[in-house]
Amino acid sequence: MISAYQQSLGGMGEVRVRMAPSPTGFLHIGTARTALFNWLFARKYNGVFVMRIEDTDPERSQKIYEKDIVEGLKLLGIDWDEGPDVGGQYGPYIQSERLDIYKKYSRIYTGAISSSLLMKRKLIIVFVRRKNLWRRTRIWKRAEKYTATAESVADLVPSRLKRTWIKESRLRSV
């Protein structure tokens, strides 16, 4: 029998949930609770439970905490289908190892990537204004220097800057 939740998906695909603990301290009850709920939800609906390590605070993140969180969750019987220790098609699963991916998309968003490269990747710029290009590029350069000690990411973006929307068509393998 199909549950109401599965029917509500309407063919959108499988359930994917993730747990993204920050290795800035030992495993605590809040992290374990969130992991348990996500794990149960994924298992109930034949979904995928993803573990991603959110090591975005380089000054406080430590490998000993990461190891403790992973081992603690495993001790509780919580396993994952994708993660740093098991891999998966959407890796890497450690946030700091994904920086090149984020930089690529940030350069596209700010307009700091050539139009010929955009065409090669079948990306279509829907709205780009030259006068905003300089601002977006300037923001990108400031964002590259962002650390966890900055007041907030919002300080990087002027409030009057309008968003540039980019539509990405599906890439086909040649």
Image (cartoon, grey):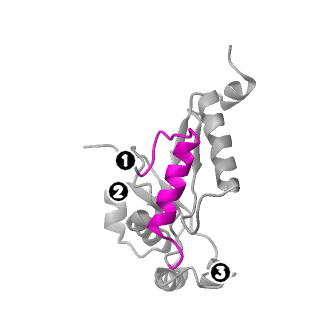
Q: Which mark is residue 171?
A: 1
Image quarter of residue 26: bottom right
Q: Is residue 144 magenta?
A: no
Which mark is nearer the camera, 3 or 2?
Answer: 3
Q: Which quadrant would the N terminus be assigned to in this image? A: top right
Reading the image, the residue beneath label 3 is 152
Q: Residue lying furthest front in this view?
A: 75
Secondary structure beneath dot 2 equals: loop
For the residues bearing labels 3 and 2, Cβ distance under 8 angstroms: no
**Residue lying at 31% horizontally and 66% vertically, measured from the top left:** 116
User: What segment is highlighted magenta in the picture?
Assistant: 59-84
Looking at the picture, tell me which residue is in the foreground, 126 or 165: 165
For the residues bearing labels 2 and 1, Cβ distance under 8 angstroms: yes
In the image, residue 3 sits, relative to residue 91, either above or below, namely above
Q: Which quadrant would the C terminus be assigned to in this image? A: top left
Q: Is residue 81 magenta?
A: yes
Query: Where residue 58 sits in the image (x, y, percent)?
Result: 49, 76
**Residue 158 placement, left or right of 14:** right
**Residue 145 placement, left or right of 164:** left
State which tag comes first along the sequence, 2 or 1. 2
State which tag comes first along the sequence, 1 or 3. 3
Q: Which mark is residue 121?
A: 2
Q: Amino acid at mark 3?
A: Ser
Mark 1 neighbour class, 10 Å CA radius: few under 14, some 14 to 19, many 20 or more:
few
Secondary structure beneath dot 3 equals: loop
